[in-house]
Image (cartoon, grey):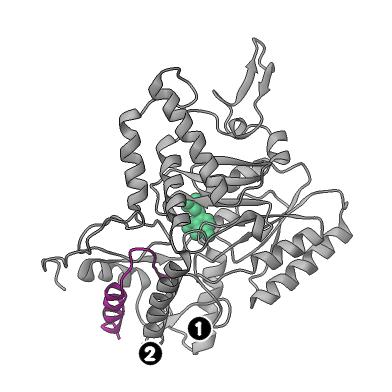
Amino acid sequence: PAATEPAAPEPASSGPLDVLGVPGEINLDYAASAPCARAAADAVAELLPWYASVHRGAGALSRRCTLAYEQARQTVGDAFGARVDDHVFFTRNTTDALNLLARALPAGTTVVTFAGEHHANLLPWPRGSVRLPVPTDPDAAVRDLAAALTELRRGSNPALPVLVAVTGASNVTGELWPVTELARVAHRHGARIVLDAAQLAPHAPVDLLALDVDYLAVSGHKLYAPFGAGVLIGRADWLDAAPPYLAGGGATSHVGPATHDVNWATGPARHEGGTPNLLGAVALAAVCTALDDADRAALAAHEQALLTRLRTGIAALPHVVELRTFGPDAPRVGIVSFVVVGWDSSAVAARLAAEHHIGVRDGLFCAHPLARRLLSEAAGRTGRRDLPSTALRASIGLGTTEAQVDKLLAALADLG
Ligand code: PMP
């Protein structure tokens, strides 16, 4: 449709998991930031009149805000299966959560991760971390991790801590990683494991206890809440012993006159110095509640049907090549990366936006090692030497419709 064509009416909206949007604009970039759910918008609107300081005031407004913030912590912790002795820290996003954990690692910790990770789960880790190659399939990931941990334990002091850092679902391909098996291997070797659930949590329930992972990081803005609130949940001991991530007001239990005369708080306050993001926390909690109340199996089935439609449509276009790490049938969430042969990916993205009002992402998706590897794998698989050097990504979620998927497919077909 031309830019001036009147927008199709959006479906009437009332449920807590309806997402807000702009009529006529098609957002197929949920993996970057998902649209805001009505539950989150309503929670913010309800609290705005009460807006006052958190943990810092005695007035009725302030007390309500403090209560709301701590209730949000409880709700989010419960939603992700936090154990009774876990801490739940509100952070800005997943990047912030993983950086917080990285700063809390005991001295001498080795972090083991895979080259298939988002930069947020590659770059915060200390020097000397082990980066395993992108595995060819989920079983290989488990085998490679077991071999690496065996080797590490043989070579180093077995008392030194090891942390395995893995994603639940790839932000490039949407493919699911074998988290439970990786956790089992990590624990068998005396290591801990952190799950980057930024992409998994918007598509499936994530439960620390059930997955048996030690730490979990999530971003609110990918989970239908507004920007600026994320969460790190996990074992208290390292975090209570670590220097405060954000030194300042609220992170102390006592400050004396001498510069070194400080007692840092334990618990979430230790790493949450400064005035917290109440609205972000409350919005994230509201989405968690709405998702808990929803029929997640039905939501997932709907998303998988749309994903199949999208992938089948792409497979039928000879000039469009899907990127993937594992086999074509590997389970995945609603994310597909691809290239259009003979087209620069940024030109395709710009054209989709300008001519079709479709928003997708182009580039290497903050996962350069993985995206480059998949581009070269796609060139090998298809025998095409003229693939572009960056890719396109379409990602779907709660507000996505068949008509939107079909519009993307039709627009891509036009490029052939
Ligand atoms: N991990 C994964 C798998 C992601 O997809 C992203 C965001 N693209 C991040 C971490 C970082 O999330 P944020 O930008 O919200 O910190």
What residue do we see at 42% from left, 28% from top? 64
Magenta range = 391-416
| Numbered disc in front, either 1 or 2 | 2
For badge 1, the amino acid type reads Ala
Above or below for 401 versus 309 = above
Above or below for 170 versus 194 = below
Q: Can residue 68 be seen in the rendering of this structure? A: yes
Say which mark, if any, is on residue 318: 2
State the image coordinates of residue 21 (x, y, percent, origin top left). Answer: 26, 57
For badge 2, the amino acid type reads Pro
Residue 414 located within the stretch drawn in magenta: yes
State the CA–CA distance, disc 1 to disc 2: 14 Å
Q: Which quadrant of the figure contains the C terminus?
A: bottom left
Mark 2 Cβ and ligand 1 under 8 Å apart: no
State the image coordinates of residue 185 (x, y, percent, origin top left). Answer: 76, 64
- Provide the secondary structure element on which disc 2 rests: loop
Answer with the quarter of the image where residue 7 lies.
bottom left
Say which mark, if any, is on residue 379: 1
Q: Earlier in the sequence, mark 1 or mark 2?
A: 2
State the image coordinates of residue 69 (x, y, percent, origin top left). Answer: 47, 34
Neighbour class for label 2 at 10 Å: few (<14), some, many (≥20)?
Answer: few
